[in-house]
Amino acid sequence: MLIANPASRRGKRLARHAHHALASRLDECDVLLTERPGHAAELASTHGGGYDAVFVLGGDGTVMEVAGALAEEKMTIPIGVLAGGTGNLVARALGIPLSVDKAVPALIDGDEVVIDLGRTDTGRRFAIAAGVGIDAAMIAETPSWLKRRLGVLAYVIMGSRAALRAVVGGELFEAQVTVDGIAHERRVAAVMIANFGAVLGDRLTLGPEIHTDDGLLDACLFSPRSLGDAVRIMWRMYRRDFRSDPCVLYVRGREIRIETQPVKPWQADGELMGMTPFCAIVEPLALRLLVPRRR
């Protein structure tokens, strides 16, 4: 089954293209189009049990609707992610080609992996990360017209702007991050609850030894006090250099709660969810995914 969001970036044309690519490789492939927010989850819950695999074409929000629905119903059907949004964080994290023509054969002839999910107290599940601060500001402030014109580059531009404003403009905030009952308090620019260790196709590594199948989530607290601190943190993340740093704290656990002063918007896998506080728990090995064959 292919669940496609015709309202996401590139829309109905890409949905038709994805169906043709899948039909050329499979004996049978049914297509279901979403009509409203939340509809992808309904389609997956209602129809998913009758198929060998579910392919999802859309943005990260559509992907996680389907993933969350299958996890909720405890269906072990593998999901194949076809990039159809702006950020495509899930596809990039899994090494899935962003071209449908390349992604379809890579997934059909590829491997399966089983990963943990994070589940927030709102009921929303996330595969990559949830966070507050720079990342949430980036999502909130990137205009639709810029996403349509530049794709993921729009997030890079707006994220850099949010980071400069936080550090140079003094927009740090107080955060209390409680991991398995132990509280950590810092003045921060961003806090992320990570399930994947890297984003944007491994260009940026969030922290050390973050694994998708260890039954744990990783709290990453970033508290630069100057522009030099911020540049050093970014350079180390790019180089995967995780030596001790007074401006970074990593804590691993099964349940993580974030409180902030003042209250701040937070995001999960590129979708704004609401205002702090929020809590996330790990769901071990909750999602089965199709991925390109590992060399």
Image (cartoon, rainbow, N blue to C red):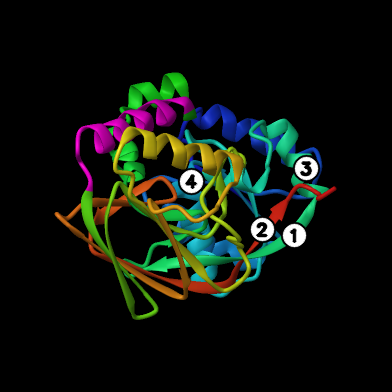
Point out the tag, 2 or 4, that comes first from the N-terminus: 4
The residue that disc 2 covers is 289
Q: Cα distance, mark 2 to mark 4?
A: 14 Å
Q: Return the residue at label 3.
A: 106
Q: Which residues are magenta?
A: 153-172
State yes or no: discs 1 and 4 in contact (Cβ < 8 Å).
no
x, y percentage for residue 179? 38, 73
Label 2 sits on what residue type? Leu
Vertical comparison of 122 with 145: above or below: below
**9 and 143: which is toward the camera:** 143
Q: Main secondary structure of the magenta part?
A: helix
Q: Given the current orientation, which residue lies at the most extreme left position?
A: 262
The amino acid pointed to by label 3 is Ala
Where in the figure is residue 131, as x and y percent of width and height?
36, 53
Query: How far apart are the alpha carbons under marks 4 and 3?
Result: 19 Å
Tell me which numbered mark, 4 or 3, is placed earlier along the sequence.
Answer: 4
Label 2 vs label 1: CA separation? 6 Å
The reply to whether the C-beta atoms of the residues labelled 2 and 4 are less than 8 Å apart is no
Label 3 secondary element = helix
Mark 3 or 1 closer to N-term? 3
Q: Secondary structure at mark 1?
A: strand
Look at the image and say whether residue 168 sits in the magenta stretch.
yes
- Would you say the residues marked 2 and 1 are in contact, meaning their CB atoms lie under 8 Å apart? yes
Question: How many residues crowd around disc 2 within 10 Å: few (fewer than 14), some, or many (20 or more)?
Answer: many
The amino acid sitting under disc 1 is: Glu
23 left or right, relative to 254: right
Q: Is residue 62 visible?
A: yes
